[in-house]
Image (tube, grey):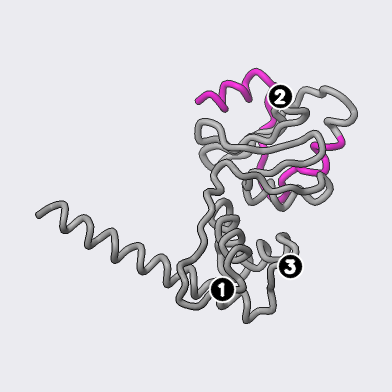
Amino acid sequence: MKEIIRKILKEEVSTQKDNYQRKMIEILKREGFDARTPYQKVLKYLNDVMSIVGMDAFEMYQLFKDNVSTVSNDPLVRKDIKDRKMKTANIRARDVVVNRIPFKGSNTHAEYRNGAYVVFSYGWYPVFVYKDGQWFENEDGYSMSTKKQMSQMRPYNFDIIKTNKDKLWDIIRG
């Protein structure tokens, strides 16, 4: 009996989620967005107007992009994006960092590790970490190119705690 109730509840919740996602896709289409619209514009709209941020905004953007032309009653295409990274130039990566979306830039990338959002320079050097509602910044200088990357990607309008690389790794490890 419990298994039957679980199946019914799961089906009802997934139906509601599907309806919500279809409605969001329709709203984005009505606002004039299409598959060629730069992700920055879609994310900004989702953030400012719909209050959808972070991975939720990225997932909605991906769902919109993958289904914008086929929103009829066909099943929505859902790609697993947990390990997927958006490609962006470092100069435009700030919005992606603020929204805590995994990305791949020029000698930079961001990913989730142990519940922390971590921005790396050159694949191994953590420069920004977001964990438990707080931003942390690496105060140790490594190179001029890393400093330039940091200035391009630094989250704005947040209180950022500056700390050294070793403490950042402690935060990342939990």
* Vertical arrangement, residue 101 with respect to residue 146, above or below: below
Q: Secondary structure at mark 1?
A: loop
Q: Amino acid at mark 2?
A: Trp
**Dot 2 corresponds to which residue?**
124
Q: Which residues are magenta?
A: 148-174
User: Percent x, y for residue 106?
Assistant: 82, 39
Q: Which residue is mark 1?
A: 70
Residue 132 location, x and y as percent?
Answer: 51, 39
Residue at x 24% of width, y 61% of height:
9
Q: Earlier in the sequence, mark 1 or mark 2?
A: 1
Crowding at mark 3 (Cα within 10 Å: few <14, some 14-19, many 20+) = few
Residue at x-position 32% and y-position 63%: 13
Whole-number angstrom distance, CA of label 1 to CA of label 2 = 40 Å
In the rendered image, the residue lying farthest to the bottom is: 30
- The label on residue 37 is 3
The residue furthest left is: 1
Image position of 142 with respect to 54: above or below: above
In this view, the residue in front, 112 or 165, is 112
User: Which residue is situated farthest in the front direction here?
Assistant: 74
Q: Which mark is residue 132?
A: none
**Structural crowding at the residue carrying mark 1, measured as other residues with C-alpha within 10 Å and reported as few (<14), some (14–19) or many (≥20):** few
| Front-most of residues 123 and 138 | 123
Where, by quadrant of the figure, is residue 150 drawn?
top right
Above or below, 173 against 37 in this view is: above
* 51 or 40: nearer the viewer: 40
In the rendering, at what x and y percent does residue 70 appear?
56, 73
